[in-house]
Image (tube, rainbow, N blue to C red):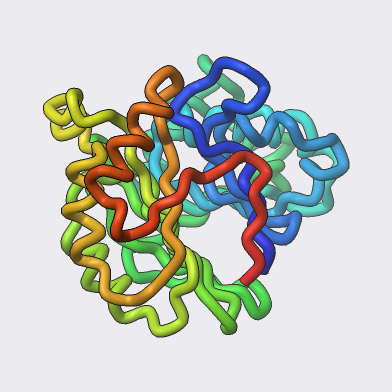
Amino acid sequence: MKLRILGCSGGIGGRHLRTTSMLIDNDILIDAGTGVADLSLSELSLIDHVFVTHSHLDHVATIPFIVDTVGGMRAKPLTVYAIPETIEILRKHIFNWIIWPDFTLIPTAEKPFMRFEPVQLGDTVNLGNRKVTVLPANHAVPAVGYQMDSGRASLVFTGDTTTNDPLWEIVNKIANLKYLIIETAFCNRERQLAELSKHLCPSMLAEELAKLVPSSEIYVTHLKPGEIELTMQEIEECAGQYRVRMLQNNQVFDF
């Protein structure tokens, strides 16, 4: 599996800041933030699967545009995987004919441009020799993370989450874990805001990483624009022993 980071910022502002989206092998998206908009028309048309962690706009913003732009170019519908609570939110608040047309009915209900596929915690979706497993997250709205397993190695993306003991119980059993991508949205002075919005700050990140058993390369995502340098400095101070690196746009993971 080859995973390319299309966006990993907690906001926008400048050519290098795109919100959360990751492309696997040209046909799978993990979240669909603003980074997807940098793909070409032909690249967009190759995407068959979108795995959504949660319904917040920075993670789903481009789904409506993808299906509207390339739906008619494709022979089969775009499949959007999410837990039922997230699907309900997307149906009610985005694909509702008010914010955006319901592309599960366009051009017809029998042959739509898009379809939803509900998944539950613990489910594994097999796509050839690639496995995507749904992991628990603890966020302000119903949310999940994902494990991507090629058979040779695994990459875990926590999604947006705060303290999350159930996640570590599962992650610590992944024998082939190679990469961990975990969020840190706020600096330490905003710890109260991080707790309220169910994100992490550097001191909380250190507390979470202390629960991790397997050795892996650790990358931090979702840093807020304007606080990137400060937050990374605090991560070094709080969690330096874990050798946490900042995730970069266009970074590629081969596993």
Q: Residue at x 58, y 29 (%)?
A: 18
Q: Residue at x 58, y 42 (%)?
A: 248
Image spot of residue 89 (x, y percent): 38, 34
Vertical position of residue 114 compared to residue 127: above or below: above
Image spot of residue 137 (x, y percent): 28, 52
In this rendering, position of residue 128 left or right of residue 188: right
Residue 157 occupies which quadrant of the picture? bottom left
Image spot of residue 252 (x, y percent): 66, 55
80 or 33, which lies in front? 33
In this rendering, position of residue 109 left or right of residue 195: right
- Image quadrant holding the N terminus, namely bottom right
In this rendering, position of residue 214 left or right of residue 27: left
Image spot of residue 200 (x, y percent): 25, 40
57 or 19, which lies in front? 19
Q: Residue at x 37, y 74 (%)?
A: 215
- Image quadrant holding the C terminus, namely bottom right
67 or 23, which lies in front? 23
